[in-house]
Image (spheres, rainbow, N blue to C red):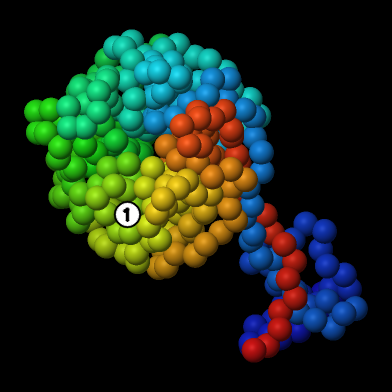
Amino acid sequence: MTTYKEIFGKPVKVLSSDPSNETEGQVWYNSSSGTFKAGIGVGAWASGGALGTARASMGSLGTQTANMVVAGYAPGLSNTAQTYDGSSWSSIPSLSAGIRRSNAGFGTTAAAASLGGSIGGLPPTANTVNYVEEYDGSSWTAATGYPVGVYDIEACGSQTAGLGAGGYATPSDPGTTLNTNFDYNGSSWTGNNNMNNARRNFSMTGTQAASLVAGGVGNPTKAEIYDGTNWTAISDITSTKMSAASGTTTAGLVYGGSGPGSEVATTFIYDGSSWATGDSMATARDFLGGSSASPGSSALATGGYVGTALQTITEEFTVAAETKTLTSS
């Protein structure tokens, strides 16, 4: 017969020993130690399979176990792409419209999209493009172009319900950091209400109807969320740019990038109301790839720069339950 003991007026199971497979949020009373205990989610980074080609400033998309990186510096401007299955990377067909960097990716490894980018040069004349290409699991084809040529842009969502935001528009609109964003339905782009802050080289994760953006050149401490109609400012984040992101608007992760003066390895965790600092990556780097389709309990950090050196490093973030003794305070 199961017995219970109350904590804060709530009954919890009495166990003679801690469970071997505790889950996050599980609470019990250990009768042997005479203590209440709980499974607390703890996130940590671990090494993953190395990229076959060192890469940075690329489009990235997908999850921790089904990820894609496309174009970027690899080294030099690239149109190549690779996919990750949770343990190793494999080459897939290259983009059809040529080399580029600072593009964005969204979708899945079987239904992906690459958006925008620069085909050479530096600001304020970086030869930006509005190219959109879609991948169907075997080849890339041209799709309806983005409304403006832009690079340092970010995107999230699916191939038929995507969202592109921010970026840097040149040379038709020289040197302009954007706060515009557009929905994609698989065939056309539609403008939305502007973000509160113009930004480029920022972090973005989520879906077309629920996305989180943070940091970036222009507004490195500002963050906001999108509900499919409006953008709402949320708590400031510690200054960050050229970082990556994963998760949702209530369980978001922002990691790596550049802080004041150098690359950082820090992970910031957003719980729907405030930011906290989580486990740091093993290697500080910027211009890395992320996994915008991952839930907040997992993430992927891929490639990037350490100084001027391109990286093949892949790190995986996973939240696991850990037993903690509850004490009154």
Taking the image as shown, residue 258 lies to the left or right of residue 221, namely right
* Rendered view: 262 above or below 60: below
- Under mark 1, the amino acid is Pro
Q: Is residue 67 visible in this depiction of the protein?
A: no
Q: Position of residue 239 (x, y in %)?
A: 37, 57
**Numbered circles on residues, count:** 1
The percent coordinates of residue 163 (x first, y second) are 28, 39
Please identify the quadrant where the N terminus is shown. bottom right
Graded by Cα atoms within 10 Å as few (under 14), some (14 to 19) or many (20 or more), the crowding at tag 1 reads many
Q: Residue at x 25, y 61 (%)?
A: 232
> In percent of the image, x 52 and y 62: which residue is there?
277
Q: Residue 37: give x, y in percent of width and height.
A: 75, 74
Q: Secondary structure at mark 1?
A: loop
Q: State the residue position of label 1.
A: 220
Placement of 209 over or under 98, stated as above or below: below
Residue drawn at x 67%, y 54% as measured from the top left: 320
Whether residue 51 can be seen here: yes
Residue 284 located left or right of residue 50: left
Residue 204 coordinates in the image, percent (x, y):
36, 45
At 50% from the left edge and 41% from the top edge, which residue is drawn?
Answer: 285
- Name above or below for residue 127 compared with residue 62: above
For this rendering, which residue is in front, 176 or 231? 176
**Residue 65 placement, left or right of 135:** right
Viewport quadrant of the C terminus: bottom right
* Depicted 326 relative to depicted 17: above or below: below
